[in-house]
Image (cartoon, rainbow, N blue to C red):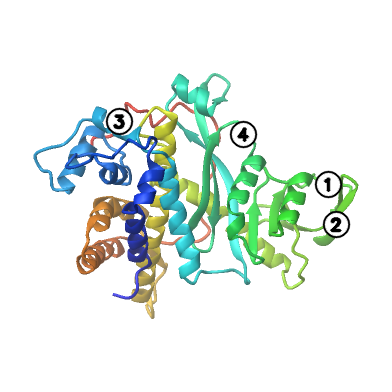
Amino acid sequence: MAKSLFLEAVEVTQNVLHDYVFKCESRSKPTYFTREGRHKLNFLSTILFMLNFVKKSFQIELDDYFKLLGNRTESISKQAFSEARKKIKPAAFIKLFDTIVDWYYKENPYKKFMGFRIFAIDASILEINNSIRLRDAFGVSKGSSLELARAMASCIYDTENNLIVKALITKCTDGARSVAIKLMNSFKDHLNNNDLFLFDRGYPSLDFFAYLIELNVKFMIRTPVNYYKSSIKSSVPDQIIELKRKGSVMRLRAIRFTLPSGEDELLITNIEDETFGIQDFKTLYFKRWRIETKYDELKNKLQLEKFTGDTPLSVEQDFYATMFLANMASLVKQEADEMIAKEQEGKDLKYEYTANANVLTGKLKANLVRIILEESPRRRKKLYKQMLDEIKRNRTPIRPGRSFKRTKGLRANRNGLVQKSAL
């Protein structure tokens, strides 16, 4: 088996989990987890339980988890776990998530498009339990006859490498642009001159253009076609424009084209390089859609909205744990897809194939904690190879040109705390 990014990421994770400084920084009080001894829910076992894709009935998850750890006759109650999780800050999961991202870009070759790292930024509304304290913490969304607690997820997503590089969970009423600025500021130390950011229609504004220019990154923003009419000629598909803001002038580029559906699209960018033609911007336009697909994966494959608690602490813990898990799943999928592609070489197939995301998630749930806990590199590699072989046997065809209508209406919760499945 060739070099495995996933197994290297596991080693990075192990190093963090066993770092005493990490433990000290992750405790909500310095006195917590100081006398662990043989306590069943120590710091490490509590963290790993929350990294075990906890989506089923809570007691079933706890019983299965302690069987995995070798305690076949004993488990703990969900009340005991609830007390243990209070001792751990959400920052613990942010640290795990950030460490994998930092390692990935420092230690590995990564894919680019026309020399750029391509990042998409977008937000998505999340279902949370409709309790008073979560309403107070994250706000409510209002429909014609409903008012429900909701939160907002915002991500920076690397479209070429299928990696979430930064994420925030905030109030559902926060402005998308202001949250995007928080995300980009938190990623500032990792930026370079070859970064290109893609945004949807909710982001264009003169102040936001100015912020991105000052940050010295390239950007492309999908813009409503009726914006900046006085500065953009509707008959010119590719033009340099000047937009005035607070006495200064911003020099930008406007790209206009028609989609196969007949709908006109307007893109505004600060890329003046003429080697970027309209077709290249069309390609970037469709690359931005990948973040929509990623949110679909987070919600429907990784079941992000099935939060395991009714407190802001538990919601944040679950959210950042899922961001870490999403990237670990991405590394597995990348390796499985490479193996599938190699097997397909030279074959006259109607479709190309990719790993089945549902099967991958299920296999990762059954094996991730076991692999992290395995101290022997040889046995760890064997466990991973067995999992990877099972994943690549369950493949699904890639059907180009498929699209799905995005539903934005406010609906009653599908993921309430009393609705956990038993299987």
Q: Determine whether the residue tagged by mark 2 lies in a helix, strand or loop.
A: strand
Q: What whole-number distance in Å separates the C-alpha atoms at marks 4 and 1? A: 25 Å
Q: What residue does disc 3 label?
A: 82
Residue 177: x and y, percent? 66, 42
Q: Position of residue 245 (x, y in %)?
A: 85, 46
Residue annotated with mark 1: 228
**Who is closer to the viewer here, 75 or 58?**
75
Answer left or right for 351 relative to 14: right
Q: CA distance from mark 2 to mark 1?
A: 10 Å
Q: Which one is earlier in the sequence, the residue at label 4 or at label 3?
A: 3
Q: Quadrant of the C terminus?
A: top left
Question: Which percent across, then down, holds residue 4?
Answer: 35, 69
User: Mark 2 touching mark 1, by CB under 8 A?
Assistant: yes
Residue 379's place in the image compared with 198, above or below, is below
Which mark, by number, is residue 241? 2
Sequence order check, earlier mark of 1 and 3:
3
**Sequence order check: which comes first, mark 2 or mark 1?**
1
As drawn, the residue found furthest toward the left would be 73
Up-down relation of residue 81 to residue 120 (above or below): above
